[in-house]
Image: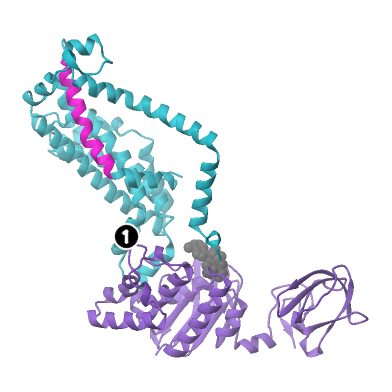
Chain colours: A purple, B cyan
């Protein structure tokens, strides 16, 4: 119902190339997440898939059909934007039905699809309101509802949760996960948030500087990171949760600079001779005085990753 | 979470408002300046209106006194309605102003949309070229314009005026509106595209409603010089059938003798329609100015 192939896609704005030879397969029903530093081209790639931007080269196929010359509305996609992008002068209901009306869908069917989507997203109480009369979270639910109503083959999300506060973000994230389960639709999702990427994705696509660096399932990526960014020297890396602290001895000495109590976790920042500022994540409530000296060791040697000069992992 | 923790516009709105209320000194100073300016600006209008209701003797005897008792006279208005076809002049002025305004707003907004929305070769250059007219007065081209109008048979028609005023208003309109349209969210336009709107729908349904305050600003700046203009009506359309109010009022100003009652009454009447148009746009205008009309 909604597979996607991206073959050799390039994009340049004038002389600046922002995407280099992107190749990606997304299977029907898959939840794919694009992550990567700001400016690496995630939104641009998403806009090319949507047809809002023309690729400089390469081809896009949805369900096997080439769509490079198909306008956005005819590609069978729906998009949810970071800024919600609701029509300010239309009610929630009209916002949700705008796409179907444009397509000339029969009235009863529009009613049915809007009712169905607003039930799924608990939007019934707001149907008569305008976007200005809704909270941020409600607005984003309307934007998601507008996408659902179109019954697309492919959902595109561009950082949909980044304007929401933490509690709402968790809530909406769960809602999107549920939506994916219920609709069994293909979804492509851009985010900066590691938690979103780990919890939602079937497949994570790591981008950097206009290139795809790595593709894999969340746990694959977690356990076998491939790139550290270019560091220019041989380095090693260990995740904060794979380090242990001891008072009387260990691999590296460090002075406690700062302690963050997150409730369930405690982050300890230590200044070390060997590696500068090191973060250690400990489970539960742990108290250390700033300024005291502690010893850091990896909890197991298999958690140590070695990177070469180009930032690629050495196995 | 209390109401004090709401994000975004509300919070900014509240804090600026509370700043204004908490410094009465600044508020008084600002009001004093504004009131003084209002008085200076409205004084000539006030003088025109009171004197239009006075007899000739009273106008020259005591120009600043109010039109009561002996001084009161409607002779000016009588002459205005007896001599010449003032209703027609009014109609001409209104037709020219409204039609030119319509074209300035329509074409100005369309050009502004193209400049702000689409990337094409020579975009900046085209924008500069279109804005150039702000600095070059259109009257410099009067002779050429007159030749053009005569050659195309448009002399002594209202179309001559409408076309010239449209050309005169477009540069500022394009300049202001394109600045404003750049601020309309790309996501919103893209959402429209995904929903299947064509570019015209996006322009008329999404973008125009959002730049309404700017449109009102442009409307007022465009409308007043057109309504008040004497130059082009005199040169391009001086015939009886196409006279505008400002030109019509000239017939009371003679080489040897001026009928001040007539002039003042005609001018007092000429203020009314612009005032009405202004009131229509003013609410939008205030929003436009307070949101930083010309950045
Ligand atoms: N219209 C444009 N004209 C020129 N350059 C552009 C344009 N749009 C984007 N770019 C450039 O393309 C690159 C990729 O932009 P893009 O918006 O895709 O980044 P992103 O990965 O989505 O970043 P973020 O995470 O900050 O949203 C950036 O370097 C940006 O400056
Ligand atoms: Mg982006």
Task: Reply yes or no: does residue A73 show up in magenta.
Answer: no
Q: Determine the image quadrant of residue B249.
A: top left
Q: Position of residue A290 (x, y in %)?
A: 84, 68
Q: Position of residue A307 (x, y in %)?
A: 75, 80
Specify whether residue A17 is in view.
no
Q: Which residues are magenta?
A: B258-280
Residue drawn at x 51%, y 71% as measured from the top left: A43
Of the pair A162 and B9, the residue shown nearer to us: B9
Above or below, B288 against B136 in this view is: below
Above or below, A117 against B54 in this view is: below
The quarter of the rendered structure image containing the N terminus of chain B is bottom right
* Farthest residue, direction left: B82
Of the pair A75 and A164, the residue shown nearer to us: A164
Label 1 neighbour load within 10 Å: few <14, some 14-19, many 20+? some
* Farthest residue, direction right: A248
Q: Is the shortest distance between ligand 1 and the CB of mark 1 under 8 Å?
A: no
Above or below, B215 against A18 in this view is: above
| B176 relative position to B75: left or right | right
Specify whether residue B15 is in view.
yes
Residue drawn at x 87%, y 67% as measured from the top left: A291
| B2 relative position to B88: left or right | right
Residue drawn at x 20%, y 30% as measured from the top left: B270
Q: Determine the image quadrant of residue A277.
A: bottom right
Q: Position of residue B158 (x, y in %)?
A: 15, 38
Residue identified by numbered label 1: B203
Task: Reply yes or no: does residue B277 show up in magenta.
Answer: yes
Mark 1 residue element: helix
Q: Position of residue B248 (x, y in %)?
A: 15, 26
Letter of the chain that mark 1 sits on in the rendering: B
Main secondary structure of the magenta stretch: helix
């Amino acid at each position: 119902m909604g597979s996607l192939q991206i073959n050799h896609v390039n994009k340049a704005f004038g002389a600046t190339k922002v995407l280099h030879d992107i190749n990606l397969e997304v299977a029907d029903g898959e939840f794919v997440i694009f992550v990567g530093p700001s400016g690496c081209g995630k939104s641009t790639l998403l806009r090319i898939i949507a047809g809002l931007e023309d690729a400089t080269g390469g081809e896009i196929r949805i369900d096997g059909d080439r769509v490079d010359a198909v306008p956005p509305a005819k590609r069978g996609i729906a998009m949810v934007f970071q800024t919600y992008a609701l029509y300010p002068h239309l009610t929630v209901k009209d916002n949700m039905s705008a796409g179907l009306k444009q397509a000339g869908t029969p009235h009863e069917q529009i009613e049915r699809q809007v009712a169905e989507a607003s039930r799924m997203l608990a939007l019934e109480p707001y149907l008569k309101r305008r976007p200005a009369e809704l909270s941020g979270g409600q607005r984003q639910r309307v934007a998601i509802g507008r996408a659902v109503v179109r019954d697309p083959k492919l959902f595109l999300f561009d950082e949909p949760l980044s304007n929401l506060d933490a509690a709402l973000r968790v809530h909406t994230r769960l809602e999107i996960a549920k939506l994916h389960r219920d609709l069994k639709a293909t979804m492509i999702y851009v985010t900066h948030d590691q938690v979103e990427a780990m919890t939602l994705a079937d497949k994570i696509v790591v981008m950097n500087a206009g290139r795809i660096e790595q593709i894999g399932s969340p746990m694959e990526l977690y356990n076998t990171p491939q790139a550290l960014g270019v560091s220019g020297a041989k380095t090693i890396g260990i995740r904060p949760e794979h380090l242990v602290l001891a008072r009387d001895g260990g691999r590296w000495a460090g002075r406690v600079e700062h302690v963050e109590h997150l409730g369930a976790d405690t982050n300890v920042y230590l200044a070390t001779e060997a590696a500068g500022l090191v973060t250690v994540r400990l489970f539960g409530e742990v108290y250390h005085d700033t300024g005291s000296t502690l010893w850091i060791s990896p909890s197991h040697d298999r958690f140590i990753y070695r990177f070469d000069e180009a930032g690629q992992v050495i196995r | 979470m209390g109401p004090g923790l709401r994000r975004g516009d509300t919070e900014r709105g509240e804090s600026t408002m509370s700043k204004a209320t908490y410094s009465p000194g600044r508020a008084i100073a600002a009001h004093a300046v504004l009131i003084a300016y209002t008085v200076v600006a409205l004084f000539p209008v006030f003088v025109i209106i009171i004197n239009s209701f006075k007899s000739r003797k009273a106008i020259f005897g005591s120009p600043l006194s109010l039109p009561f008792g002996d001084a009161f006279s409607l002779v000016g208005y009588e002459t205005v309605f007896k001599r010449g076809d003032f209703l027609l002049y009014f109609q001409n002025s209104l037709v020219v102003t409204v039609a030119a305004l319509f074209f300035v707003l329509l074409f100005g907004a369309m050009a502004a949309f193209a400049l702000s929305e689409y990337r094409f070769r020579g975009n900046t250059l085209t924008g500069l070229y279109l804005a150039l007219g702000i600095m070059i007065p259109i009257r410099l081209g009067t002779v050429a314009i007159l030749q053009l109008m005569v050659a195309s048979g448009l002399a002594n028609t209202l179309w001559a005026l409408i076309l010239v005023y449209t050309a005169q208003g477009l540069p500022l309109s394009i300049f202001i509106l394109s600045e404003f349209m750049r601020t309309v969210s790309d996501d919103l336009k893209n959402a429209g595209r995904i929903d299947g709107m064509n570019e015209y729908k996006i322009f008329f349904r999404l973008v125009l409603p959002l730049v309404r305050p700017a449109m009102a600003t442009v409307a007022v700046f465009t409308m007043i010089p057109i309504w008040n203009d004497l130059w082009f009506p005199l040169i391009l359309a001086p015939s009886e059938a196409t006279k505008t109010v400002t030109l019509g009022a000239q017939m009371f100003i003679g080489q040897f003798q001026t009928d001040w009652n007539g002039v003042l009454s005609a001018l007092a009447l000429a203020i009314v329609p612009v005032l009405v148009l202004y009131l229509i746009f003013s609410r939008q205008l205030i929003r436009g100015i307070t949101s930083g009309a010309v950045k």
